[in-house]
Amino acid sequence: MQENPVVYLVGAGPGDPELLTAKALRLINEADVIVYDRLVSPRIMDLAPSGTPKINVGKQPKLHPVPQEEINQLLVSLAHDGRRVVRLKGGDPFLFGRGSEEAAYLRQHNVAFEVVPGVTSASACAAAVGIPLTHRGLSNGVRYVTGHCCDTSDLDLDWRGLADPATTLVLYMGKANIPQISIKLIANGLSETTPVAAICNGTRPEQRHIVSTLGEISGATSTADFKGPVLFIVGRVVELADILGVAAPEIRPASPLKERRRA
Ligand SMILES: C[S@@+](CC[C@H](N)C(=O)[O-])C[C@H]1O[C@@H](n2cnc3c(N)ncnc32)[C@H](O)[C@@H]1O
């Protein structure tokens, strides 16, 4: 217990416990209570002391067991009880993690907070399958985009701007909308042959990924029947997985759709 209430908004990274920051691990060990999301991997939760209370507020796509407003109130009330609260989120809390909404609510209620960044799934998944997000001559920039908008089926994105062959596009939360996303990108000028990687459960023991093209990624993803979070990387840098990826060449199927499991 402490005199000054404080909430730590902590990024847990993509799943591999070794990608947790030293600060995150220290705070997890010192917490009076941990409030965690669905995307925080069980292997990371296993690092927390067994006596620390752990509250699961995990959301699933289209199924939000604990509404965001209740999570916000819970954080304030735990902090007002004088507890050192660790609010643990997958990846980085300020990247598609609603960490900033929680921070704003804490500020409004005069609760001190600190944001502890985590390794976001874009860089972790890309590294795990041998794809650099930029590469001289292939991509001069990278954009992180949501593939899911506010529970509506139509994605309202700047498709013309996004369909840029000179940059890499990373799509978070795009699994359900990948058919719509690929059609829009092609309609706005990206070639059907643009390479695309889909990485499921990146950095976890059950990691799987496929390499395909924009024209075929929708069918390939549905065939792969991924169970778990999926990140899409679109752009020429995906070609480099062939030489920088860790999967041995002999395990690749001959078809244009290449599926690999973690080595
Ligand atoms: C609500 S967003 C949270 C992003 C998180 N804050 C981050 O920085 O990675 C959830 C999306 O992140 C991506 N994601 C998170 N962890 C992942 C993982 N281990 N493997 C693949 N994708 C992941 C997926 O696109 C998933 O739908």
Image (cartoon, rainbow, N blue to C red):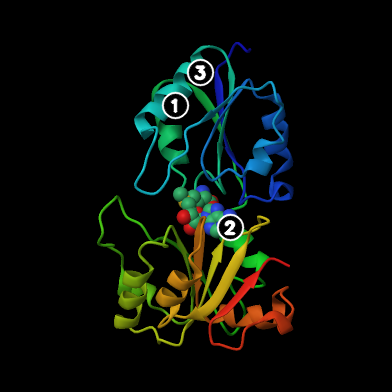
Where is residue 48 shown, x and y percent of the image? 69, 31
Q: Is mark 2 within 8 Å of ligand 1?
A: yes
Name which residue lies at 41% across and 33% down: 104
Mark 2 or 1, nearer chain start: 1
* Secondary structure of the residue carrying numbered label 2: loop
Q: Residues within 10 Å of mark 2 (few under 14, many from 20)?
A: many
Where is residue 25 shown, x and y percent of the image? 71, 36
Mark 3 or 2, nearer chain start: 3
Q: Residues within 10 Å of mark 3 (few under 14, many from 20)?
A: some
- Name the kind of residue labelled 3 in the image: Leu
Report the disc number at residue 12. none
List the residue tagged with mark 1: 106
Q: Is mark 3 within 8 Å of ligand 1?
A: no
- Name the kind of residue labelled 1 in the image: Leu
Asked if the residue at tag 2 contacts the one at tag 3, i.e. Cβ–Cβ closer than 8 Å, the answer is no
Tell me how far mark 3 sits from mark 2, CA to CA. 31 Å
The mark lying in front, picked from 2 and 1, is: 2
Where is residue 256 shown, x and y percent of the image? 54, 87
Looking at this view, is 120 or 57 the one in front?
Answer: 57
Report the disc number at residue 78. 3
Tell me how far mark 3 sits from mark 1, CA to CA. 11 Å
- Name the kind of residue labelled 2 in the image: Asn
Number of marks in the image? 3
Where is residue 174 shown, x and y percent of the image? 41, 62
Q: Quadrant of residue 132?
A: bottom right
Q: Quadrant of residue 90?
A: top right
The mark lying in front, picked from 3 and 1, is: 3
List the residue tagged with mark 2: 201
